[in-house]
Amino acid sequence: MSRLRVMTYNVRACLGLDGARRPERVAEVIRRAQPDLVALQELDVGVARSGGVDQPARIAELAGMRAHFTAARSLGEGSYGNAVLAARPFAVHSEGALPVRFGEPRAAQRVTVAVGGAEVELVNTHLSIHLVERWMQARALFAEVERVEGDPRFPSLSGVGERLILCGDLNSGPWSPVYRWLSRRLTDAQRAVGGRAAATWPANRPLLRLDYVWFGASVGVERVSAPRDELTSVTSDHLPLVVDLTVDGAAG
């Protein structure tokens, strides 16, 4: 059995609650947590409001990791979307769009990483703020959909093995239809460790659980935290969620 530390973090294009846009603070939050894999949401690449900075590349450089960015939509001359950062080698399996009706475009990305000889699949996404779209997007993650070459949709996770880890800002509470849908397929890390689940939004006074790490049958959890201190309370409007996982079938 091997261990894997995963972080999911909505960084709001590195815009802190103090109005400063600083990728350096995001990188420092990551360095302090020392995760193996990081799922980041709401990042700018080449966008004027962020000074044209490639935020995932900059954060990865400062944190000593590698990054892969998946654009959800264009924003001026640049792009806005999600990124996976890794402290170990990984491969991009797939990426693509989620269904949308009236809200902003959303995307998901899937990477594979070797953990003690076993292959783990990590998916990073950010679901809509609109109830109907959230439901459509959650179902699309596991839908059986015919795809052809060049299809921009995110490939279904239906049939993916037991070492799946799903991370992200789901904009859903534990009472929601989306939560119930996912709980029939995966395990919520916070519920699995027992005790009171930590809220992650807003960062300066957390009231709601919006950020999650879910996992399949061959993955377990040892510890979950939503670090709240002087740095994380101002870096974004969300707190990071840090989860220590175990992977069955992987050599220690």
Image: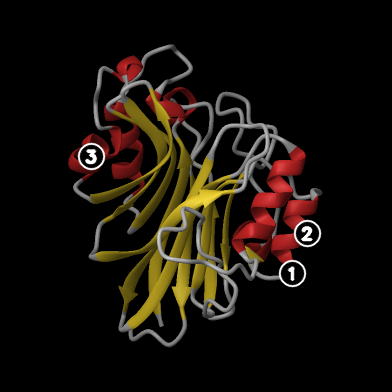
| Screen quadrant of the C terminus | bottom left
Q: CA distance from mark 3 to mark 1?
A: 36 Å
Residue displayed at 39% across by 71% down: 3
Residue displayed at 51% across by 71% down: 164
> Tell me, what colour scheme is on the image?
secondary structure
Which structural element holds mark 1? Answer: loop
Label 3: how many residues lie within 10 Å, few (<14), some (14-19) or many (20+)? some
The image shows residue 67 at horizontal and vertical percentages of 27, 49
The amino acid on which the numbered mark 3 sits, given as a three-letter code, is Ala
The image shows residue 15 at horizontal and vertical percentages of 42, 21
Q: Which mark is residue 90?
A: none
Label 2: how many residues lie within 10 Å, few (<14), some (14-19) or many (20+)? few
In the displayed structure, would residue 176 be above or below residue 202? below
Circle 2/circle 1 CB separation < 8 Å: yes
Residue at mark 2: 180
**Closer to the camera in the image, 7 or 85:** 85
In the displayed structure, would residue 203 be above or below residue 87? above
Which structural element holds mark 2? Answer: helix
Label 1: how many residues lie within 10 Å, few (<14), some (14-19) or many (20+)? few
Residue at mark 3: 57
Most distant residue in the top direction? 19
Q: Which badge, 3 or 1, is on the more N-terminal residue?
A: 3
| Screen quadrant of the N terminus | bottom left
The reply, left or right, for residue 184 in relation to residue 214 is: right
The image shows residue 32 at horizontal and vertical percentages of 32, 43
The image shows residue 28 at horizontal and vertical percentages of 29, 35
Residue at mark 1: 184
The amino acid on which the numbered mark 1 sits, given as a three-letter code, is Arg
Q: Which badge, 3 or 2, is on the more N-terminal residue?
A: 3
